């Protein structure tokens, strides 16, 4: 799948545009990280990209087709969205939550059956969370729930997954677990991924491309190795940063350290 946004603009009624002339392109098996300060409109950007909010100008394209011309079932059979995690009003087990990911493939009044149960069990085994099959999602840790939501997204057999701050609130162990899974899905399985994040170091670790925007309407887009530098990150977050390189396990790991306010 080739996923594109061309000249995307968005503003809420009677307010100034918060997104202006957004242009980006994501190819199959690539990871795009979206970065910016709190309240800048990153979640709004994701929703506009997927058609959950309508661009005031511009459009989103899937393989060259304007997303507005596609039926919801056509869109959601190709894209899986993992929003920021919250509690649930009803008690669902891990297995039930994963099965919900097949809803776009079922008829309006069709209920999940044996096939969907087997698919959910197989997906939980693939992701490594079979132990969570019978656990109440409202009683899971943040890392456990995030992995369940990733399994729910994957059972849809998507060509693109969109994740809104997937590692926020997680400890180091669970951050690495989630990032490894995203990287494996993209680079091994060929599934495109778009990820909002507050952590430039995490973006450096997994992203092929990066898109950054600030409160002045400036944006930077391109290869992550080019975009995620000291000058751009300082300009986006209004914080002086230092980019350091660390050698580990025959790899060079780039790390971003905030040192002072600008």
Image: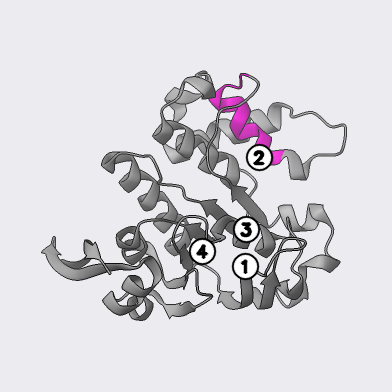
Residue at 59 percent of width and 34 percent of height: 98
Q: Quadrant of the N terminus?
A: bottom right
Of marks 3 and 1, the one in the foreground: 1
Whether 147 is among the magenta residues is: no
For marks 4 and 3, the one nearer the N-term is: 3
Of marks 3 and 2, the one in the foreground: 3
Task: Report helix, strand or loop for mark 1.
Answer: loop
For marks 3 and 2, the one nearer the N-term is: 3
Expressed as whole percent of the image width and height from the top left, the position of residue 225 reads: 33, 77
Residue at the disc numbered 1: 18
Residue at the disc numbered 2: 101
For marks 1 and 2, the one nearer the N-term is: 1
Q: Nearer the viewer, residue 171 or 2?
A: 171
| Above or below, comparing residue 237 to residue 131 in the picture | below
Residue at the disc numbered 3: 44
Residue at the disc numbered 4: 190
For the residues labelled 3 and 1, say whether their Cβ atoms are less than 8 Å apart.
yes
- Tell me the CA gap for discs 4 and 2: 19 Å
Expressed as whole percent of the image width and height from the top left, the position of residue 262 reads: 28, 69
Instruction: For label 2, count other residues whose C-alpha is less than 10 Å away and answer few (under 14), some (14-19) or many (20+).
Output: many
Task: Report helix, strand or loop for mark 2.
Answer: helix
- Tell me the CA gap for discs 1 and 4: 32 Å
Task: Report helix, strand or loop for mark 3.
Answer: helix
Q: Nearer the viewer, residue 120 or 73?
A: 73
Of marks 4 and 2, the one in the foreground: 2
| Above or below, comparing residue 114 to residue 103 in the picture | above
């Amino acid at each position: 799948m080739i996923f594109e946004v061309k000249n995307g603009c968005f503003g809420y009624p009677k307010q100034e545009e918060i997104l202006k002339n957004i242009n980006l392109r994501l190819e199959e098996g690539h990871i795009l990280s979206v970065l910016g300060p709190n309240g800048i409109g990153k979640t709004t950007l994701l929703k506009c990209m997927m058609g959950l909010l309508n661009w005031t100008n511009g459009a989103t394209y899937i393989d060259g087709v304007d997303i507005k011309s596609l039926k919801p079932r056509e869109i959601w059979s190709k894209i899986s969205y993992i929003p920021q995690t919250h509690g649930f009003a009803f008690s669902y087990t891990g297995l039930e939550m994963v099965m919900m990911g097949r809803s776009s493939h079922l008829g309006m009044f069709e209920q999940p059956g044996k096939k969907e149960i087997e698919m959910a069990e197989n997906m939980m085994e693939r992701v490594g969370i079979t132990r969570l099959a019978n656990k109440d999602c409202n009683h899971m840790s943040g890392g456990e729930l995030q992995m369940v939501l990733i399994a729910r997204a994957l059972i849809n057999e998507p060509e693109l997954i969109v994740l809104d701050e997937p590692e926020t609130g997680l400890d180091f162990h669970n951050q690495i677990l989630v990032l490894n899974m995203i990287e494996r899905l993209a680079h091994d399985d060929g599934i495109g991924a778009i990820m909002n994040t507050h952590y430039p170091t995490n973006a450096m670790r997994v992203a092929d491309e990066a898109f950054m925007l600030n409160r002045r309407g400036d944006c930077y887009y391109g290869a992550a190795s080019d975009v995620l530098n000291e000058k751009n990150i300082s300009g986006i977050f209004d914080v002086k940063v230092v980019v350091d390189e660390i050698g580990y396990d025959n790899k060079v790991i780039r790390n971003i350290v905030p040192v002072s306010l600008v």
